[in-house]
Amino acid sequence: MLFETTMKHHNIASVILAGGKGTRLHPLTLYHSKPAVSYGGRYRLIDIPISNSLNSNIRQILVIGQYLTTEIGHHLSQTYQFDNFFPGRLDLITPEEKPNGERIFFDGTADAIRKNLDKILELPVDFFLILSGDQLYNIDFQKMFAF
């Protein structure tokens, strides 16, 4: 073989923060959270970090939502379906709701991680990527970890 690459695949999970109201993007975000804003006609901004994760062979993905999470939940369940041929996990975590219906929102990104640390640490992985759910980029996370 003339060329052979041996890259170790790390055991990684992606934790995607998808809670932004996106007030600077009004009117696009009047009825949608920022990660749910349409991109390229049929995609949402949340699809970018999920796609980068899946293309990097990261199959354990948690999305932590906060604002208008019903739409994101519907999109994720309709778009990403894992099975025996494409194993993985994609879960949406939403803010806790009190018995009176009031939602307990997160006080920023670090608070979203802190309040969901028990769910995050349940994942059987060695490393966690904390990603933004509303930024556009293309990266192979396995190469980043190899560096």
Image (cartoon, helix red, strand yellow):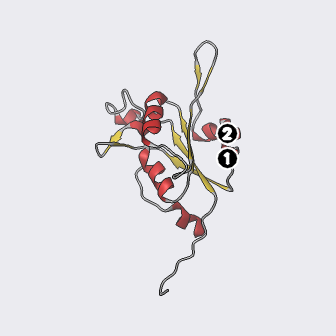
Determine the residue located farthest toward the bottom in the rendered image: 2
Q: Which of 22 and 123 is in front in this view?
A: 123
Q: Is residue 29 left or right of residue 50?
A: left
Residue at image coords 46%, 61% = 139
Residue found farthest to the front: 84
Dot 1 falls on a residue whose secondary structure is loop
Q: Which kind of residue does numbered mark 2 sit on?
A: Lys
State the residue at coordinates (58%, 15%): 101
Which residue is at the front of the view, 109 or 144?
144
Quadrant containing the C terminus is bottom right
Residue 119, numbered circle: 2
Residue at (46% x, 43% y) in the render? 80
Residue that numbered label 1 is attached to: 123
Q: In this view, does 40 lie to the left or right of 70?
A: left
Residue 76 position within the rendered picture, expressed as x and y whole percent measured from the top left: 46, 38
From the top left corner, tell me how far across and down residue 66 is, in percent.
Answer: 52, 31
**In the rendered image of this protein, does residue 9 appear above or below residue 31?**
below
